[in-house]
Image (spheres, rainbow, N blue to C red):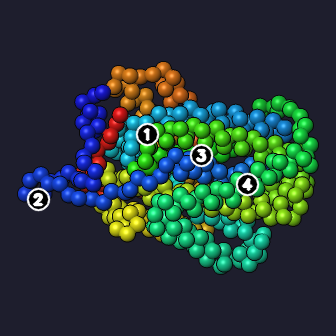
């Protein structure tokens, strides 16, 4: 281990902060520490709900139209292509135990400025897409409650949903994880029922055909997007009982499980082959044919819960990300405010909720959503590059780790090259804002050291 990393590996006592007063004397200040309450199964909920949102309800029809019976296997290829990035995060997670995820990885490898950019890119991505996801959820609910199609009611409902998520997160991590667990069941069980109904009432022999490469190229990016969000599990590591053990295991097992679930749901859609015109509600149409009205309603409800859980997941993890950035002295100390009653990073949670609601009131959000995906790729590239950099510095570079990092960066760059120019301009603007924010506000000393294993 290098001298710099050895220094970073010496954490301060829990709940204390090193600093210097105006007279120059060294002093220790008490700061509120977040309790570690989350075990493995709670940890596993974060990557699951980060990956499974609206996509699983829209992708089957899109992929089936693009590549036919090859669609399930395309998802398998996507899961395999995504695994090197997941493994990079898993190996990095074994080195750190504080909240912050990409912030810690980027800073340890490349310094505070790059660490800030990794965290800012992740946070900006989550904020600019949260309101868009809520809009999709309200659109699904409008099928059951037509009044929600009215723009005024839609805006009020979006704000109310985001406010409710914020309040639940304020109450505590235990309540947030419990709520997330219930929401996960509501979205996964109807999908499981759809797969079973396809076995009973569908045509299991969907065949197998390899499409032309040009046809695959038009939809292959969707398979990458389907897995984005798994990294959320690294951000609240400071509230997990055994983060170095549980986070890597949760990442690998849940990326594998989600790949299998996507394959099963897409196979079920192809086996049922519903005649529906609306791709966004395609699974509801499939459920209508095999399970009747009750099944169709169950899928609509599942879609709403899936998108809500995806949003809830981000509203739980992102405040911990900026809390970790504030601990590193990259954001104002205000973000370190912890509720004395609930032990949650209250100021960071409130800020995230208000920002999400503000974006929810902004029309023309589609370009920002695409730019949010693009800016997240910055985080992916920084984190993938951090792994071999740290190992090389320590003299422990492993060929497999270096290979996975290179593959992860290559795939991320390939995806980034597919976006349009307007999204690139918004992406550049978000990075510029983050850079300005860093130089204006990130002047404090770190509250925590980087515990590198």
User: Sequence order check: which comes first, mark 1 or mark 2?
Assistant: 2
Residue under circle 3? 228
Q: Are marks 2 and 3 in contact (CB under 8 Å)?
A: no
For discs 3 and 1, the disc positioned in front in the rendered view: 1
User: Sequence order check: which comes first, mark 2 or mark 4?
Assistant: 2
Residue under circle 4? 189
Residue under circle 1? 244
Q: Residue at x 70, y 33 (%)?
A: 77
Q: Residue at x 55, y 60 (%)?
A: 178
Q: Residue at x 49, y 42 (%)?
A: 247
Q: Quadrant of the C terminus?
A: top left
Q: Nearer the viewer, residue 68 or 174?
A: 174
Q: Residue at x 89, y 34 (%)?
A: 207
Q: Position of residue 266 (x, y in %)?
A: 79, 44
The answer for how far apart the CA atoms under marks 1 and 2 are is 38 Å
For discs 1 and 2, the disc positioned in front in the rendered view: 1
Q: Position of residue 305 (x, y in %)?
A: 67, 61
Q: Residue 128 occupies which quadrant of the picture?
A: bottom right
Crowdedness near tag 2: few (<14), some (14–19) or many (≥20) residues, C-alpha within 10 Å = few
User: Sequence order check: which comes first, mark 2 or mark 3?
Assistant: 2
Decide: is 312 above or below 150: above
The answer for how far apart the CA atoms under marks 2 and 3 are is 46 Å
For discs 2 and 4, the disc positioned in front in the rendered view: 4
């Amino acid at each position: 281990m290098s001298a710099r990393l050895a220094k970073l590996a010496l954490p301060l006592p829990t709940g204390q902060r090193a600093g210097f007063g105006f007279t120059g004397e060294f002093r220790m200040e008490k700061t509120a520490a977040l309790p570690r309450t989350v075990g493995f199964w709670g940890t596993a909920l974060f990557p699951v709900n980060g990956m499974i949102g609206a996509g699983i309800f829209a992708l089957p029809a899109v992929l089936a139209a693009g590549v036919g019976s090859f669609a399930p296997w395309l998802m398998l290829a996507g899961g395999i292509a995504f695994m090197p990035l997941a493994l990079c995060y898993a190996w990095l997670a074994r080195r750190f135990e504080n909240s912050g995820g990409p912030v810690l990885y980027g800073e340890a490898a490349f310094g505070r400025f790059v660490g800030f950019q990794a965290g800012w890119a992740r946070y900006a991505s989550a904020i600019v897409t949260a309101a868009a996801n809520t809009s999709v959820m309200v659109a699904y609910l409008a099928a059951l409650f037509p009044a929600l199609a009215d723009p005024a009611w839609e805006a009020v409902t979006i704000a109310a949903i985001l406010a409710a998520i914020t309040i639940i997160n304020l109450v505590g991590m235990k309540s947030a994880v419990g709520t997330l667990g219930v929401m996960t069941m509501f979205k996964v069980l109807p999908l499981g029922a759809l797969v079973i109904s396809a076995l009973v009432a569908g045509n299991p022999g969907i065949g197998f055909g390899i499409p032309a490469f040009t046809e695959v190229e038009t939809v292959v990016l969707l398979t990458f997007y389907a897995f984005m969000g798994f990294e959320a599990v690294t951000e609240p590591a400071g509230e997990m009982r055994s983060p170095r053990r549980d986070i890597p295991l949760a990442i690998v097992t849940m990326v594998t499980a989600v790949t299998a679930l996507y394959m099963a749901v897409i196979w079920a859609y192809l086996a049922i082959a519903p005649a529906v015109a609306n791709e966004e509600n395609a699974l509801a149409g499939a459920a209508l044919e095999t399970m009747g009205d009750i099944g169709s309603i169950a899928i609509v409800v599942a879609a709403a819960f899936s998108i809500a859980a995806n949003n809830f997941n981000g509203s739980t993890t992102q405040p911990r990300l900026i809390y970790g950035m504030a601990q590193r002295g990259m954001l104002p100390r205000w973000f370190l405010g912890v509720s004395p009653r609930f032990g949650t990073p209250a100021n960071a949670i409130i800020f995230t909720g208000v920002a999400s609601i503000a974006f929810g009131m902004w029309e023309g959000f589609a370009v920002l959503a695409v730019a949010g995906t693009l800016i997240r790729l910055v985080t992916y590239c920084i984190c993938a590059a951090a792994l071999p950099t740290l190992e090389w510095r320590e003299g422990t570079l492993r060929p497999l780790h270096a290979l996975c990092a290179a593959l992860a960066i290559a795939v991320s760059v390939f995806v980034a090259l597919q976006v349009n120019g307007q999204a690139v301009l918004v992406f550049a603007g978000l990075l510029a804002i983050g850079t300005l924010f860093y130089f204006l506000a990130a002047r404090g000393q770190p509250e925590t050291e980087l515990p590198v294993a």
